[in-house]
Image (tube, grey):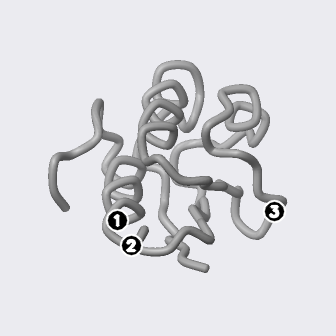
Amino acid sequence: MAERRVTIGWAEGLHARPASIFVRAATAAGFPLTIAKGDGTPVNAASMLAVLSLGAEGGDEVVLSTEAENAEAELDRLAKLVSEGLEELPETV
């Protein structure tokens, strides 16, 4: 299992627009991915309702994880998106 622990860089956390950006990026990754707030229960990162249900605020730590092989680079890209509060998925890490 590969995982990344990152601090949310969006001031508003994973709500509305940032959650939508993250969910689109997670879906585009092309492999099953979960996100958990701290050490909480992981939820499907490709589900808008599941991500919103986390109640993740800016500055909270989240854990991105997957069982997919060769997912390291994509996890790095998603972690960068979350930690820097970017408006779109970066081309490279």
Which dot, 2 or 3, sits closer to the camera? 2
Read off the residue under disc 2.
72
Amino acid type of disc 1? Asp
Q: Earlier in the sequence, mark 2 or mark 3?
A: 3
Gap in Å between the C-alphas at discs 2 and 3? 22 Å
Near mark 3 (Cα within 10 A), the count class, few <14, some 14-19 or many ≥20, is few
Residue 46, compared with residue 77, is above or below; it is above
Read off the residue under disc 1.
76
Q: Residue furthest bottom?
A: 1
Amino acid type of disc 2? Glu
Amino acid type of disc 3? Gly
Q: Is residue 34 left or right of residue 21?
A: right
Q: Residue furthest left?
A: 92
Q: Secondary structure at mark 2?
A: helix
Callout 2–callout 1 Cβ contact below 8 Å: yes
Return the x and y of residue 57 as percentages of the image width and height.
61, 42
Q: Nearer the viewer, residue 33 or 52?
A: 33
Q: Residue furthest right?
A: 41
Gap in Å between the C-alphas at discs 2 and 1? 6 Å
What is the quadrant of the C terminus in the image? Answer: bottom left
